[in-house]
Amino acid sequence: MSNKKGYEAGSRNVFKDIGVPNAEEHLVKAQLVFKIDAIMKGRCLKQVDAADLFGIRQPDASKMLRGEFRQFSVERLLRFLVAARSRCGDRGQATRLTTL
């Protein structure tokens, strides 16, 4: 059936619409990274400080924030989110996230 509007309505998952494998997981990861980035901006947390808090290298934090987050599991991103949310007010109080 032809669509007179000239476009196709997509789903709520753009990754599914463009055919990304594991689209649901990718959407969850994207949402988690979006929240992590918002918290970092709200708390004026620099990438180098966030990387130290998360126990990763700054270039990996940069890649994650630019959308290259396939290397991180949903569980790990959740730990990053929790660490970013529970970060104390001053940098000296932040505790590094240990990996299991």
Image (tube, grey):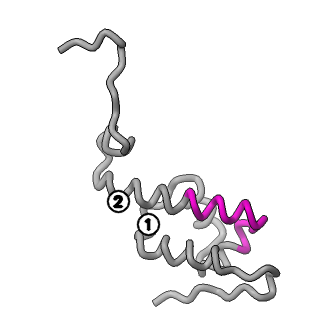
Q: Residue at x 63, y 74 (%)?
A: 85
Return the residue nearer the eye: 53 or 78. Answer: 78
Residue bearing the label numbered 1 = 71
Is 41 part of what is drawn in magenta? yes
The numbered dot on residue 25 is: 2
**Quarter containing the N terminus:** top left
Which amino acid is tagged 1?
Gln
- Residue 82, position as x, y percentages in the image: 56, 77
Left or right: 25 as drawn, with respect to 86? left
Residue 6 higher or lower than 29, as above or below: above
Q: Residue at x 41, y 59 (%)?
A: 28
* Picture quadrant where residue 100 is located: bottom left
Direction from residue 23 to residue 55 in the image, left or right: right
Residue projecting furthest to the top = 4
Element at label 1:
loop
Q: Nearer the viewer, mark 1 or mark 2?
A: 2
Q: Position of residue 88 (x, y in %)?
A: 74, 82
Which segment did they paint magenta? 34-49
Mark 2 lies on a secondary structure that is helix
Disc ID at residue 55: none
Residue 96 position, x and y percent, is 65, 86
Q: Residue at x 33, y 38 (%)?
A: 11
